[in-house]
Structures are given as C-alpha cells and as structure tokens.
Image (tube, rainbow, N blue to C red):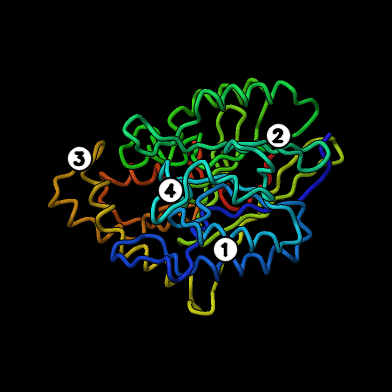
C-alpha cells in the first residue's frame, strides 16, 4: 500500500553551458535560460519537503559530456533523490562524436540518479515503501542509423517480467516520448508523430494489463494531461521554452480510501538576465513560429495553398504558445470561420463542448 507522498517533475531541461550554445536564428529553445531557470526551480523545490524528483529526459541540449557532467554534479547537491531517463537530445548518436556522448555511456553519468550499476538505459527502483518507478528508454537507432522514438523488444520483455513481480505497489512510469496523444491526431500528423512513441499501442497494452495508471513524459514541450482508457500521460513542458513550467504533485488517500494525484504547475517567472521571462519568451516563440505555421497550414488535413498559408500565419503567431501553456481555449481566436473548428480541436474542450481545464491544476482520482 503506497503512503502519501510529494514529488516534482521538471522536463526538457536542455542544459547548455554558455560555451556549448550555438547561435542559430530559428532556434526554438531559449537555452540561454537553461541553467538560471533550473536554479530558480531548485530554489523553490528545496523548500517543499519533496520525497523525490523526476526528470523525463532532454537533460542536455545536444548530449554534450560537459553538460551531462554539470547536471550530474548539480543533482548530487539536492536534498532529495532524483531519477532521470534519456531524451533524444541526450543520446543523439550511437557512438560518441566531437559533440555528444555515446548512447551506451548515458548510465555512467547518472549512476546516483536511478541507474545504479545498470548497463542498460532503463531501470526500476523502489522510491518509497509501496511505490515503484519504472524508467524506460525510448531512444533507438534504425538500420540507417537514424534516431527514432521506440521501446525495443528486449525492454518490453523486461517490462512485462518486472510488472509481473509487482505486488501491492503503486507504479510510476517515466518515458521521454508521449504514449497517448496530446494534440489532435498526434500519432498520424507528419509534424507531430515524432513526439509519439512509435510502438505506443504495444506499450499501452502491457500497462493496461498490469493496471499501471500514471505515466510521466516530456519531449513535446507542452503542458498537457491526456487520459485514455485508464491511463494518464502527464506531459510536462520544457524549462527552456514558454511557459518554462514544472509540476509538483501529491499522492494521497482520502477518508473514503480513494487515491488522488493532485497536480500543481508553476512557471519560472524571471531569471537574472531575463527579468520578464514570460513575456520575452512568448514573443520569442511567436517570432519564430512562421515556418512552423506555414507547414501546418499547407499539410493535410488543411492543405491550404502556400500563398494563403503565408497570409494567414502572422495572425496565428500566438497559437503554439497557447498550446504550450496548456488549458488553451481559443475563444477569442481570430482565424477564418472555416478554420476555427480545426484550431479549436487543439483546445482544452471536453467532448460535450465545455471547457475542460485539466492540464495545469487538477486532482486526478485514480
Ligand atoms: Fe526537448
Ligand atoms: Fe525530446
């Protein structure tokens, strides 16, 4: 039986020491704030009497050894245990190159943060008596050497064997790629499918069979809680993109014996170099969103001609910031009428058409 406990999730840190930052005009990640934003989060979290902290991947900007080392040292100073998994940015190549560590070397950097003496990129740990973490690696390389988001067969077998031994424990599952859709048709849309785990249905089937209900993901850089058939995929936005969010959660049992997960979300409001971080970062995202919007408008299902897409894109510059923020409603949305239904489907609307604000602050009955 799990006790009451409190923990935090901080995702997609994309840590970049100043000397590792490349300057590119269309870079979407505000990596300049990665370290000061994380320091600001830790200042808050260290006051909260947390039982543990989860970091669901993209710990570093490009898998640089110096960034992994910096994070490893910083995490070792925290007063609570921290558990990590790799994101695609942490292990971008199979073998080491002049920028990044080798895929196989990831556990070496995070021995004290979940891996222990494991040689694998996945592991399980008892977090508290009655509470088990299963941390999966969703990064693989296909036959052409390209990185893909998938859980391999060996890991799925290990997962089944591990879940078969779990008795009376609450299981928390952490994986970088999303396993339930957070935006409409995410698994099929050419721009969004890379944020989903390729074999999500296979993983979901195992989780359902063993009654795993809570999954913590990252990668999409959006605040969103998605629910499907007994499983919550709680994805947390990135510390280096608007709205620079993180979550604090409490698991508790009420007087009727029911179990709840209470989710609270916070955001980094400022850093020393960015005193108005929220406004600055929202504008940064809008300023860089034109190519993304043109692509979205010209691809199926909208298929707008390029000239129309380019004319429309400036009026949609806030669109992705609203999505990333979570709980988007698009009630004052100024798109042409024939596009409104399409864009409103991205909002936080229940099937009956009423607002359904569950992405940032919610108590989930488990
Ligand atoms: Fe990321
Ligand atoms: Fe990612």
Q: Which residue is mark 3?
A: 303
Mark-to-mark CA distance, 2 and 4: 34 Å
In depth, the one of 262 and 68 nearer the eye is 68
- Whether residues under marks 3 and 2 lie with C-beta atoms below 8 angstroms apart, the answer is no
- Whether residues under marks 3 and 1 lie with C-beta atoms below 8 angstroms apart, the answer is no
**Numbered mark located on residue 171 in the image:** 2
Q: Secondary structure at mark 3?
A: loop
Quadrant assignment, res 338: top left
Residue found at x 36% / y 60%: 28
Q: Secondary structure at mark 1?
A: helix
The tag earlier along the polypeptide, 2 or 4, is 4
132 above or below 154?
below
**Numbered mark located on residue 115 in the image:** none
- Whether residues under marks 2 and 4 lie with C-beta atoms below 8 angstroms apart, the answer is no
Residue found at x 30% / y 65%: 24
Left or right: 30 in relation to 317: right
Mark-to-mark CA distance, 3 and 1: 45 Å
Q: Which residue is mark 4?
A: 96
């Amino acid at each position: 039986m799990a006790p009451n406990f409190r923990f935090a999730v901080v995702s997609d840190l994309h840590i970049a020491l100043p000397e590792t930052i490349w300057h590119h005009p269309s870079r979407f990640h505000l990596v300049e704030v990665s370290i000061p934003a994380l320091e600001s989060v830790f200042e808050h979290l260290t006051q909260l009497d947390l039982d543990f902290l989860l970091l669901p991947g993209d710990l570093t900007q490009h898998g640089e050894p110096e960034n992994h080392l910096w994070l490893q040292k910083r995490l070792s100073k925290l007063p609570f245990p921290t558990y990590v998994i790799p994101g695609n940015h942490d292990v971008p190549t199979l073998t080491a190159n002049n920028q990044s560590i080798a895929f196989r070397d990831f556990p070496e950097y995070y021995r004290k943060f979940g891996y222990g003496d494991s040689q694998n990129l996945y592991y399980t740990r008892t977090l508290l008596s009655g509470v088990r973490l299963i941390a999966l690696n969703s990064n693989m390389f296909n036959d052409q050497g390209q990185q893909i988001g998938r859980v391999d067969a060996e890991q799925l077998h290990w997962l089944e064997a591990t879940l078969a031994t779990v008795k009376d424990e609450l299981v928390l599952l952490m994986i970088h790629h999303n396993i339930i859709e957070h935006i409409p048709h995410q698994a099929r849309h050419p721009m969004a499918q890379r944020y989903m785990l390729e074999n999500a249905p296979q993983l979901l089937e195992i989780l359902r069979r063993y009654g795993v209900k809570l999954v913590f993901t990252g990668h999409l850089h959006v605040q969103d809680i998605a629910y499907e058939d007994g499983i919550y995929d709680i994805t947390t936005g990135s510390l280096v993109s608007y709205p620079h969010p993180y979550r604090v959660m409490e698991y508790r049992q009420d007087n009727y014996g029911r179990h709840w997960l209470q989710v609270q979300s916070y955001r980094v409001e400022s850093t020393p170099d960015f005193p108005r971080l929220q406004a600055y970062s929202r504008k940064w995202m809008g300023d860089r969103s034109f190519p993304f919007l043109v692509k979205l408008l010209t691809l199926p299902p909208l298929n707008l001609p390029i000239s129309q897409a380019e004319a429309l894109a400036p009026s949609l510059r806030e669109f992705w910031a609203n999505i990333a923020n979570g709980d988007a409603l698009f009630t004052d949305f100024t798109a042409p009428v024939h596009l409104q239904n399409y864009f409103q489907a991205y909002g936080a609307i229940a099937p009956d058409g009423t607002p359904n604000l569950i992405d940032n602050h919610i108590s989930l009955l488990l």
